[in-house]
Image (cartoon, rainbow, N blue to C red):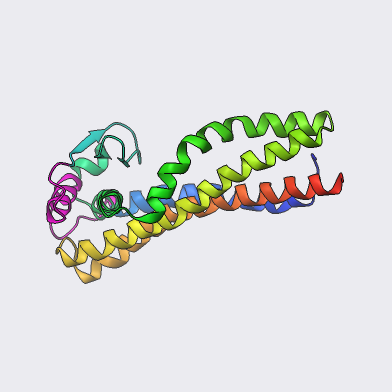
Amino acid sequence: MFFHPMDFLILIAFGISIWAQFRVKGTFNQFANVQASSGLTGYEAARRLLDAQGLYDVPVEPVRGHLSDHYDPIQKVVRLSEPVYYERSISALSVACHEVGHAIQDQESYAMLRLRHRMFPLVNFSSGLAPFLLIGGFLFQASGLILLGIIFFTAAVAFQLVTLPVEFNASSRARDLMISEGFIRNDEEKGVSKVLNAAALTYVAAALISLLELIKYIMIFRSQD
């Protein structure tokens, strides 16, 4: 269990994940110093996009933290970190419009977003138990516990895989709307893409790690038959 050949691939995936985290921070900081030609703040861009889509009742609120931006589907609110909410940079507009992309997905009942919402309660429960079931199963050679742990862990992996199209779709919507609404010029689109793609890479890396770990557990389980 502790020295499995899959561990080499998992280690590489962890390296990619760490690199992705540095890249998203570096890319955000780089374009945080590039002012958008429209002169809009992150809040103003988010508000205008929401209103343009008829989402007048969805508020935009500032929250503390760095890159803590998110759309809350329960409260129906877009929350932007203070550097995004108040600043007028390419980074601020990119992140703000990405979160609005999620609000638009919610309005349109985007299938993958709905699926992720339905999966969340189960995944929140199963992901907490899966490690204990797997560790206990391997320590005590209890195949039933291992299998249950794998099933629970599979739910968590499925959640991360479903998250990928949700995030990529929100970024695609944000990029297209920023151009159509005149928030950025064509020559600024490259910077927007770099910010959004860097953020998306962190989700890809996380999903890859989980998928490789799942394959490892399945291989160990099958080898014990």
Residue at horizontal 38 percent and vertical 54 percent from the top? 27
Residue 129 is situated, as x and y percent measured from the top left of the image, at: 62, 30
Residue 165 is situated, as x and y percent measured from the top left of the image, at: 43, 58
Quadrant of the frame with the N terminus: top right
Residue at horizontal 62 percent and vertical 45 percent from the top? 154
Q: Nearer the viewer, residue 36 or 219?
A: 219
Q: Nearer the viewer, residue 174 or 58?
A: 58
Residue 161, compared with residue 126, is above or below; it is below
Image-based side of 55 in relation to 32, left or right = left
Residue 72, compared with residue 7, is above or below; it is above
Res 83 seen here: yes
Image-based side of 134 in relation to 77, left or right = right
Q: Quadrant of residue 134?
A: top right
Residue 24, compared with residue 137, is above or below; it is below
Residue 151 on the magenta span: no
Residue at horizontal 27 percent and vertical 55 percent from the top? 108
Residue 54 on the magenta span: yes
Residue at the far bottom in the pictured view: 186
Residue 222 is situated, as x and y percent measured from the top left of the image, at: 81, 49
Residue 74 is situated, as x and y percent measured from the top left of the image, at: 31, 36
Image-based side of 161 in relation to 73, left or right = right
Residue at horizontal 78 percent and vertical 50 percent from the top? 219
Res 7 seen here: no
Q: Quadrant of residue 80?
A: top left
| Figure label count | 0
Region of the chain picked out in magenta, as a range: 32-57
Q: Quadrant of residue 147?
A: top right
Q: Nearer the viewer, residue 155 or 39?
A: 155
